[in-house]
Image (cartoon, rainbow, N blue to C red):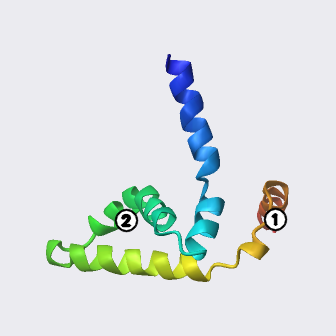
């Protein structure tokens, strides 16, 4: 039973990886956009907790707004595949 649940989660992740979610969000899919924001929720909450209490709501709103703008403007055609990404990392580390 646990194996079936894990396989379901893996399939769901494969279907909803960040690249495909971004692609769907850029094509007007509000659910995909909301899913990305939910995925980034822990990072948003972490940043929010680092400012004074009276500014936390404003910081969260600003971050979500920035994320939405970046998602909608990100050029997916220049996204490297995994091996290219690793090659670039290796190049950067050797400097």
Q: Residue at x 51, y 63 (%)?
A: 32
Residue 55, quarter of picture:
bottom left
Q: Nearer the viewer, residue 6 or 59?
A: 6
Image quarter (top left, top right, bottom left or bottom right) of the C terminus:
bottom right
Q: Classify mark 1: helix, strand or loop.
A: helix
Upstream in sequence: badge 2 or badge 1: 2
Q: Is residue 95 above or below residue 82?
A: below
Please provide percent x and percent y for residue 77: 77, 75
Q: Is residue 29 above or below residue 86?
A: below
Q: Nearer the viewer, residue 25 or 39?
A: 25
Disc 2 residue crowd, few under 14, some 14–19, many 20+, Cα 10 Å: some
Please provide percent x and percent y for residue 89: 77, 61
Disc 1 residue crowd, few under 14, some 14–19, many 20+, Cα 10 Å: few
Q: Is residue 5 above or below residue 28?
A: above
Cα separation, mark 2 vs mark 1, equals 28 Å
- Nearer to us of marks 2 and 1 is 2
Horizontally, is 15 left or right of 45 in the view?
Answer: right
**Outermost residue, top direction?**
1
Please provide percent x and percent y for residue 59: 30, 77
Horizontally, is 46 left or right of 16 in the view?
Answer: left
Q: Which mark is residue 44?
A: 2
Q: Residue at x 54, y 36 (%)?
A: 9
Q: Which mark is residue 4?
A: none
Q: Classify mark 2: helix, strand or loop.
A: helix
Residue 54, quarter of picture:
bottom left
Q: Residue at x 48, y 67 (%)?
A: 33
Q: Nearer the viewer, residue 56 or 29?
A: 29
Q: Which mark is residue 88?
A: 1
Horizontally, is 60 left or right of 12 in the view?
Answer: left
């Amino acid at each position: 039973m646990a194996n079936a649940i894990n396989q379901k989660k893996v399939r769901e992740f494969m279907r909803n990886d960040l690249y495909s979610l971004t692609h769907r969000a850029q094509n007007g899919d509000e659910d995909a956009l909301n899913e990305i924001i939910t995925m980034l929720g822990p990072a948003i909450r972490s940043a929010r907790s680092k400012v004074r209490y009276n500014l936390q709501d404003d910081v969260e709103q600003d971050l979500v707004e920035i994320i939405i703008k970046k998602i909608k403007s990100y050029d997916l055609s220049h996204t490297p595949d995994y091996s290219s990404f690793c090659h670039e990392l290796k190049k950067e580390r050797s400097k």
